[in-house]
Image: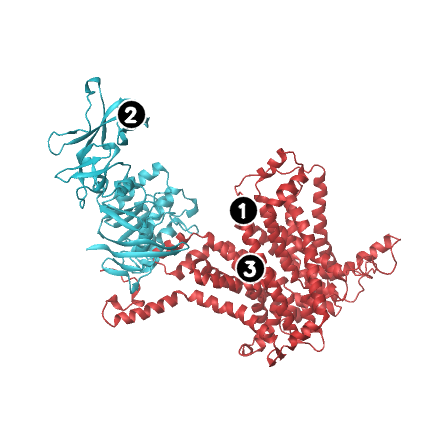
Chain colours: A cyan, B red
Amino acid sequence: MAVLKVTHVSKTFATEGGRVDAVDDISFAVEEGEFFTLLGPSGCGKSTTLRCLAGLESIDSGEIAIDGRIVASDSRFVPANNRPISMVFQSYAIWPHMTVMGNVTFPLAYRGVDGSGARLTRRERRERGMEALRLVQLDELADRRAPYLSGGQQQRVALARALVVRPKLLLLDEPLSNLDAKLREEMRFEIKELTTQLGIATIYVTHDQGEALSMSDRIAVMSDGRIMQMGTPREIYLTPVTGRVARIVGSVNLLGGSLVANSRPFAAVKTAAGHTLKCRIVAGHKLGDSVDVMFRPELVQVVPRGPRAGRARPAATRSSGNKNETNVLEAVVRGVVFTGDHIACQCDTDDGTIAAKLPPDSPIERGDEVDVVISAMSCIAS
Amino acid sequence: MAIDHGLTTGFGPGGGPASGAGLASSISQRLQAAGRNWPFVVAVIILLFLVIVPLTLLLVSSFRTGTPGNLQDWTSSNYTRVFETPATFEALGNTIVVATVSTAISLFFAIIFAWLVERTDMPLRNLSWTILLLPIAVPSILFVLSWTVMLSPRAGLLNVLLRENLPFLAAEAGPFNLYGIGGIIFLDAVRGVTTIFLMLVAAFRLFDPSLEEAAKVGGANILQTLRRVTLPVLMPAILAAGMYSFISSMDQFEAALAVGLPGGVFLLSTLVYFTVSLRIPVDYGAGAVYSVLFMAIMILLVLAYRRIVRHSEQFATVSGKGYRPQRVSLGPWRYAAFALVALFGMITVILPMAVMAWLSLRPLHAVISLKSDVALTFKNYATLFADTEFSNVAWNTGWMTLATASCTMALAFLVSWCIVRGSARGRGFLDGLTFIPYAFPGITIALAMIYVFLSPPFNMLPIYGSVAVLVVALMTQYIAFGTRLMNGAIVQVKAELEDAGNVAGAAPLAVMWRITLPLLVPAVVAGWIWVAANSMRSFSIPVILASRNNEVFASQIWSLWQIGRFSEAAAYGTMLVLILLPMTLLLRWLMVRLGR
């Protein structure tokens, strides 16, 4: 059974500039133990969605069911304190007037454990609190006053406070955005491990594609209050349905053109400069449609052209077996930036500039004449 | 299955969508929504009672004949009577002259003091801060009365001293005569300095010194920099403080009563008082009209003040970064600067309190003179402590203070919580309601309360003539301050802290109690002390509403003084200051902590 079921939920805010559709008809379901991420740029509605799930915002239409019970619909609104959820806030929201233990055991006083609703004794609460603190390795700081914690420690306290009641559903609102880069990396794995270990369904809101891709079982990419695409990290990254999605999940090259062949397994797109590119295609296009061909910089190969390879060859498609077809474009290297773990390379073709991410030992220099090689598998037309 | 997180109270068991249960759940949902809104409902009801009911009754009474509790016919004769009296316009003119001149003077000195304390190398700056703050501990009425002792034209101690030592002065009276408009202006101006200083000092502290440094590099000297850069940049803050002080001066009562009336000078506040308390026969109709006019003027001023304040917030030049600005070096003038501060301390605190203490130690009916060589004694205090009248007054004062401070801050918290966290519509309404009392002069609040508690249905409450009526009136007066303070404090509590409590399972009220309120403790305590200190010092409300059973220190001092029992009055006064002094210092300490 789905722990969370969101059906056609919309939410509109009245602002000075008129009404804004913060959340526009979104639906999804999350299974037990699943790590589900809402990914999108700021203002895309992902945080509002989360606050609607938490019961901190009401919804205008649609229905939200948690653990089989409807918590928000046209005729019903269950406030946050009566929903079987926990939440970690972007600012951690650690109460500064309490100790670490006071923060962690606070929900126990109201919720009990495992949703039993049973009131616990002081002693039991403290034990549960210690247990939760041990999970996040903070048991030694239990009696410290909350303001005397570092950012990372506050983050862990917030997590312990969320986990202490063993919720059915854990909501995380950009929990890592206030940490420094190194700590962020660490916490990513820790959060993922904890939620997997405890088997909690988790909704994770972030604008960081790295976090989304590395942690999630499934991702919903949001933009303008809508879910643009939903799928596993690989699906989202490798087969984005639009350029917009592709850009939200990572950097991408876009070449415009028109569809000239809709064959299987690869379609053919003719670019403005007249090259024909083989690529996979998102369903729903017909011949003659103008489409964008997308491919990731790290899937681009740049091959130096020796004097021997100097023959003119307009946009060839090398065919060596069906699946391994590649597109080749001639280019001149315009810029090379060495960043340590890779080389960022800008190649000028007659269809525009293509970015490539090359291994750090690539012998590419500015001004080189090169072939840009992209496998047809990694090109998506949409 | 899942927990039924206490939902059974909100919805039917299991909350199944069976027919009939749908209607029931929709009703209970509405009830639940109303239940969630109860803080708002309670806040509105109390505020309506504190603000709108008195205002309305006053307005209605201005169009009726008769007396409070016994209103008769509708009439406009009250207004004709008032406008046909030349005294009306004279009092209005006097009030405006006093407010304008005294505000200008206090503004001038307050700016100098704020600049000296925050931006120069004047010595003993911490002590100066305290000196500038201390006048708060001296109730206005004590300050004013002690100066009448020093500067009354014939027997005034300072006048006598001057006449004896400077032979060219007239032998009978003078050289100073406190009784008159000059006296009111002097006393009001001196009292006004502290308020403005406190409002300005933060702006001076946070002022970005690089602006001044740029002027210096451009070749300007200290005075030119002050005049051409510092003051213009701080102008909005100065204007706001000046306007605020002007409004308080319009409302001022003590000096007008103690030195204005004997000199035959009426201000609006004393005119109201005279009309409903001293005149024979008293004229409540005219009193109501004066009050309405008074408030109309005040509302205009308060609206103007709001405009200015809004403007000054946009004009944010303060950087707020915790760096130490370079202080201006005053050279040898730094000692003169401190001497000026010390002189201020002499005038506002040391001399008045010395006079009061000295008076309180003199035998009961001794003539007030430096010459008479009567022995000083604590006998007055001993008599007082043995007297039941004193214990009654002390009891009344204590409970009035505690009740006013506690009720005001509790209401302020409730109202502010609704304003800051509530819906936009309710917010504006509550905000407006709490702002009206700013335009309520103390004297008119007191008069309005007479109307309220002598009229049905409120006359059924045994409130009129008791301490409770003082508490209600003082709450009306201080609720504006209380909500402003709490608004600011609640805004600083991040909403996510409350959301987190909500998500952790605590209902909104539990969140308010266990999270919001504890985080606001410093602000609540500071506000509590402020209201408590002001209630103890308050004068016009206790004096107008005074009866046998609700005399407090302030009204008792005045009634004893009027019947010539100066020593006892002074003993009451001295004790009051001894209570207010630590409160004031504590308040400053708390405010400094809050500011961090």
Label 1 in the same subunit as label 3: yes
Name the image quarter holding residue A111. Answer: bottom left
Tags 1 and 2 touching, CB below 8 Å: no
Three-letter code, disc 3: Phe
Q: Mark 1 lies on which chain?
A: B
Q: Is B15 situated left or right of B466 in this image? A: left
Q: In this view, does B68 lie above or below A154?
A: below
The label nearer to you, 1 versus 3, is: 1
Q: Is residue B290 above or below residue A92?
A: below
Name the image quarter holding residue A368. Answer: top left
The kind of secondary structure element at disc 3 is helix
The label nearer to you, 3 versus 2, is: 2
Residue A349 is situated, as x and y percent measured from the top left of the image, at: 26, 29
Instruction: Identify the residue under disc 1.
Output: B316
Q: Is A17 situated left or right of A232 in this image? A: right
Question: Toward the viewer: B234 or A65?
Answer: B234
Q: Mark 3 lies on which chain?
A: B
Question: Toward the viewer: A331 or A146?
Answer: A331
Give the residue at the far left of this rendering. Answer: A321
Instruction: Identify the residue under disc 3.
Output: B481
Three-letter code, disc 2: Val
Is residue A188 something one can see in this rendering? yes
Label 1 in the same subunit as label 2: no
The label nearer to you, 1 versus 2, is: 2
Quick one: quadrant of the N terminus of chain B? bottom left
Three-letter code, disc 1: Ala
